[in-house]
Each structure stands twice: as C-alpha cells, then as structure tokens.
Image (cartoon, rainbow, N blue to C red):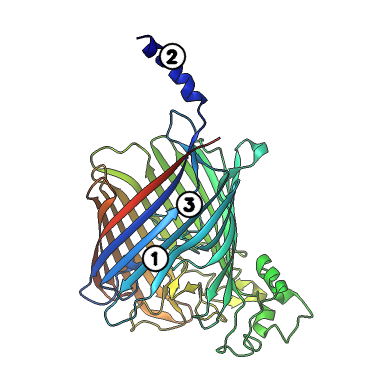
C-alpha cells in the first residue's frame, strides 16, 4: 500500500522531468493496379494532375513503390497530439513507377527522387518532388495556373521557406513563405538543355489562430538557355539561346532587352534584343480565409501574367477564382464531407486580339506557347500549368493543329468533393465543364464544349495498411475523344517510427 501511494505521488513528477520523445517517421508503400478502357484514350481526370504518371494511351497495368522519410518531430505538450519539427534535420523520398503497355517499352518513371535538409525555418532540396505552386487547394482544385502537378516533376535545386514563418517584431501578425529554384528541362525537346528559373513569395496577414487571415503573393516561372538546330538566326544565334551569368541576371529580374543599347549582336538574336530573355509566366495571387474550430473557408484568385498585359490591365479578367471548404470536425462513423472546391478559370481575353506595343495594345498573349521554345510551357509532353490549356496531341484531330498548345482560350467550371462514408473509407469526386475556343492565331471553327468526370474510392481491408483503390473517369464532348475507363489497385503501406529521447 505504501509503495502504491509513493508511486502515485512521484509518477507525475517523473513524467514531467523526462525529456521530450522525438520521432523520425518513415513511410513505405507498394501498389499494383490495372486499367480497363473500351477505347484507347485515357479520360481527362484519370491522367490529369497525376504528375505525369498516367499516359495518354491507357496501360493495362501499373506497379508503384516508394519510401519517404521526414524530419524528426517532437510533441508540443503532454496533453495534445500537436508536434513540431526539429530545427535541423534531413529527409528523402523515392517513388518508382512502371506502366505496362502491350507491345511497347515500359520506361521507369521517378516522380520523386529527392534529398532535403532543414536548417531552422529554411529547407534546401535537390531532386524531383511533387509540388503545386500558387495559392490554391492542392487536392480538389483543377490545378494552379502556372504549376499544377500535371507534369512529371522537374529535377531542380531549391531553397525555400516552406511554411508561413512569422516576422519576429510583428509577433506573428505578418508571416512569409517562399522559394527560389534552378531546374533542368532536359534534352528531349526542340530546344535542348534549357533551364528553369523559379521563385515565389507569399505573405499572410493575421496570426495563425485568428479567424480571418489575408494572403497575397506571386510566383515567377521562366524557361531560358538551351541549344537547337530547329530555329532560324533571327530566333537563336548559331543555334544557341543566351545562357551566361549576365543572361541569368536578366532572367532573374525579368528585364526587357528592348530598352538596352550596345548588345552583342553575335550572341543575342533579333528576337532576344526586342524582348526578354526566355519564356516568362506566372500568377499574382490573393486570398482571404475564414476559419473556426469546425470549418475553414478560403476564397482565392490567381491573376495571369505572361507578355505584359497584366501590367496594362488589359487581361485583368483572365485568371483562376476558387472557393475551398474544409470540415475540421472530428470524424464520425457515418457519411462526412471533409472538403469541397468550386473554381472558375477564364483565359479567353489574353489582352484582346491586337498587339501593338506603341499604342499599349498588349494583346494576343498566346498563353503557354512561345516563339523560341516551341514545346511551350510543357515537360515530357504535359502541360506544367493548368491542364485546361491543352496540347494539340490531346485534342480531336479535326480541331486546329496550331502550335504545341492549340487550345489556350478557355472558360472552365470545376468542382471537387471529398469525404468519408465510414471512419476509414474515403471518396473523391471531380466534375468539370469547359468551353474551348482554340487560340487567336488559329481559333476553333466552333466552340468545343467538354464535360469530364471522376470518382475515386479507398477501402481499407485491415488495420495494417492494406487497402483497395478504385477510380472511374469519363469524357464527353467536342474537345477530347469520348472515352471512359476504370482503375483498380491494391496498396500496402508501412509506417515506421524510430523513437529517441530528445534533450
């Protein structure tokens, strides 16, 4: 009895005197799945925003496996489940995918192969990693305008402030996140070995626990450098696009060479001397969030810039507008909606149908296409930005075959819905309707109307990480070939936590 009383008295003191227990989570997964499609074309939402993993012609099977290790985490207190990451740490990720197509080569894809290092609030990354850039919902959205997760991730090195980090003297009232990166497009393009310059900066006004917070920021994407044998001297001097340190500084600042004099005409083509070096684009984003303990609502808008029209406000009506809902209540056992998104994308204006720099008529922006980089804003044949701006290879052959992106004047409506119908079984739906007009250079003869739908289910088989995934998608309309397909797979996950007593 005396020992029991002593234990009751001193046990709380011993617990509070112990150092924090840190965890270093490691995640493993393997998935085997098969597709069925009565036709050949892969439906839009079965291949879109999948980081380039599902080809346009549907395979009959896919095999995926990966491992990921994150930073160490410490519990914030003994009475909550909240955790904070270590100030210094290292993590990595590797995903391997092989799609099996009859009578064809089955290349190995690496959507993720990276190492990351954390130093305080900053992170340094090298390799490929799944990312979405811009103020947007990353799960249910149709895709951020400039970097949507539609293409295979590009290899790059990046330094970033990945989370909103408060400015000290503001006591959390103002916080920033951002990134700065250099990447490589590769040599499987008309302009080979070109580079990516990417940066972003976003600010949050309002403390993290405030019910109302304001967001604003921008992202800048640029493709530059490279060599080619397919461009005339007026577009590429000796087949080489500018790629020296001074040229990088021009790309970094977005300077126009048209205002400079005494440029080296042996290095800069006529096109370079009249424009900016490289292919530039991005978005300026604003948003407002209202949140309580039960729900979160985020209203966001992305304004498009590419050829200077936004500076003159001639394409101000173009952009992506969305409203995201999140249900923060604890999960019940029955039907529960956990998130929803509605979005409207408009890219039909492009500053109007006239371009005259002297009169400030900066129209005909021709989004995602470029005179020098003939593959446009794409990687491995896929749109890097919003998937509603579609390559010529995806559209019906009876439509305009102009350029790489034959359809960049779009009006699109999209909605997404996710939730649970039991505590562990989840569902996801996506529906989109678009009106497509082609381009200013080669408009479609008639408006191409398109409807696409998607349904996804995840059903756990046991408590050890074994689950069945099922997806179905369909296209109906004038832009894509009418098609439908289903996917079924079995997935196994292993979560391993290495515990260690922290100091």
Q: Is residue 237 above or below residue 310?
A: below
Question: Residue 434 placed where, x, y %?
Answer: 36, 66
Q: Quick check: 396 left or right of 129?
A: left
Numbered circle sitting on residue 96: 1
* In this view, the mark in front (1 or 2): 2
Secondary element at image label 2: helix
Residue 235 place in picture, x, y as percent: 62, 85
Closer to the eye: label 3 or 1:
1
Cα distance, mark 1 to mark 2? 54 Å
Check disc 2 and report the residue beneath it: 9
> 80 or 247, which is in the foreground?
80
Badge 3 or badge 2: first in the primary sequence: 2
Query: Quarter-wise, where is residue 487 in the image?
Result: bottom left
Distance, label 3 to label 2, CA atoms, is 54 Å
* Mark 3 or 2, closer to the camera: 2
What residue is rendered at 24% in x and 67% in y? 34
Residue 212 appears in the figure:
yes
How many numbered callouts? 3
Q: Residues within 10 Å of mark 2 (few under 14, many from 20)?
A: few
* In front of the other: 97 or 344: 97
Q: Which mark is residue 300?
A: 3
**344 vs 221, nearest the viewer:** 221
> In this view, which residue lies farthest toward the left?
38
């Amino acid at each position: 009895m005396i020992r029991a009383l002593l234990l009751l008295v001193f046990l709380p003191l011993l617990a509070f005197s112990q150092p924090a227990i840190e965890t270093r989570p490691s995640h493993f997964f393997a998935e085997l799945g098969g597709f069925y499609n009565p036709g050949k074309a892969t439906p839009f939402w079965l291949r879109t925003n999948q980081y380039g993993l599902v080809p346009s012609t549907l395979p009959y099977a896919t095999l995926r496996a990966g491992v990921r290790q994150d930073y160490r985490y410490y519990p914030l207190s003994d009475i909550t489940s909240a955790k904070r990451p270590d100030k210094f740490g290292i993590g990595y990720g590797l995903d391997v995918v092989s799609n099996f197509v009859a009578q064809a080569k089955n290349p190995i894809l690496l959507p993720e192969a990276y190492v990351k290092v954390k130093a305080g609030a900053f992170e340094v990354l090298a390799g490929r990693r799944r990312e979405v850039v811009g103020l947007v919902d990353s799960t249910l959205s149709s895709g951020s305008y400039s970097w949507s997760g539609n293409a295979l991730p590009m290899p790059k090195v990046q330094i970033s402030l990945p989370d909103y980090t408060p400015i000290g003297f503001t006591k959390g009232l103002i916080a920033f996140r951002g990134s700065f990166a250099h990447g490589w497009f590769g040599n499987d393009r008309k302009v080979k070995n070109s580079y990516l310059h990417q940066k972003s900066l976003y600010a949050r006004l309002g403390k993290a626990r405030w019910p109302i917070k304001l967001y604003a920021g921008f992202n800048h994407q640029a493709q530059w450098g490279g060599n080619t044998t397919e461009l005339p001297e007026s577009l590429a001097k000796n087949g080489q696009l500018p790629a020296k340190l001074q040229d990088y500084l021009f790309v970094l600042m977005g300077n126009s060479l048209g205002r400079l004099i005494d440029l080296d005409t042996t290095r800069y083509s006529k096109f370079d001397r009249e424009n900016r070096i490289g292919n530039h684009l991005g978005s300026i984003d604003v948003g407002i969030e209202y949140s309580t303990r039960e729900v979160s609502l985020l209203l966001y808008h992305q304004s498009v810039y590419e050829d200077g029209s936004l500076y003159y406000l001639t394409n101000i009506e173009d952009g992506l507008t969305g409203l995201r809902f999140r249900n923060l209540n604890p999960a019940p056992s029955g039907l529960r909606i956990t998130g929803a998104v509605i979005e409207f994308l408009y890219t039909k204006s492009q500053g109007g149908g006239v371009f005259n720099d002297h009169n400030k008529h900066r129209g005909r922006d021709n989004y995602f296409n470029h005179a020098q980089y003939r593959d446009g804003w794409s990687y491995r044949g896929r749109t890097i930005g919003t998937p509603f701006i579609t390559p010529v290879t995806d559209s019906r052959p009876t439509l305009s075959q102009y350029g790489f992106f034959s359809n960049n004047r779009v009006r699109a409506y999209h909605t997404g819905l996710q939730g649970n119908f039991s505590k562990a079984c989840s569902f996801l739906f996506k529906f989109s309707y678009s009106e497509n007009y082609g381009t200013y250079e080669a408009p479609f003869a008639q408006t191409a109307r398109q409807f696409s739908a998607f349904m996804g289910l995840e059903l756990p088989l046991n408590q050890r990480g074994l689950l069945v995934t099922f997806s179905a998608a369909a296209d109906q309309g004038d832009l894509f070939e009418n098609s439908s397909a289903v996917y079924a797979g079995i997935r196994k996950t292993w979560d391993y936590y290495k515990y260690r007593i922290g100091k």
